Amino acid sequence: MTTVAELQPDPNREVRIVSHRESSNGVYHDGIVREVTCVNGDQNLYAVTLYRPTYGSDSTCYVYGTDQVTEPTQRAAPADTERSYADRQRAFNRQNFGLPPEDE
């Protein structure tokens, strides 16, 4: 397991930084590392720029050099929200008109 201080930019690898700077339980920062900069060496503070594929944008998080870097957990596939909405609306309409559910 590596730390933020050892982190290098790698366009082919997504990482998860577990930061204890903002919370004692840890805050997760997921993304592809674009840049790592030591902001304040006395306080061991680093600025890490992450590309987040989910949002298609970069963001900078400020973390300690001793914070752990791991592999991110698997995310679920994006929901088909239009179909889900249509299914819920149809079920709601059937219920309001006193009809039985479709799958019966």
Image: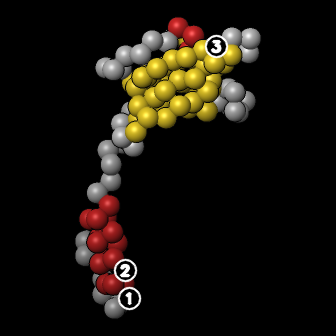
Q: Quadrant of the C terminus?
A: bottom left
Residue occupied by mark 2: 92
How far across and down, in percent of the image, does residue 70 sit? 49, 19
The answer to whether one can see residue 67 in this image is: no
User: In which image quadrant can residue 11 be found?
Assistant: top left
Left or right of residue 45, residue 4 in this image: left
Residue located at (26% from left, 65% from top): 83
Residue occupied by mark 1: 96
Q: Amino acid at mark 2?
A: Phe
Q: Tell me, what colour scheme is on the image?
A: secondary structure
Q: Earlier in the sequence, mark 1 or mark 3?
A: 3
Q: Amino acid at mark 1?
A: Asn
Foreground: disc 1 or disc 3 = 3
How far across and down, in percent of the image, does residue 87 sit? 29, 70
| Mark 1 vs mark 2, CA separation in Å | 6 Å
Q: Amino acid at mark 3?
A: Thr
Q: Mark 1, residues whose alpha carbon is within 10 Å: few (<14), some, or many (≥20)?
A: few
Foreground: disc 3 or disc 2 = 3
Left or right of residue 24, residue 101 in this image: left
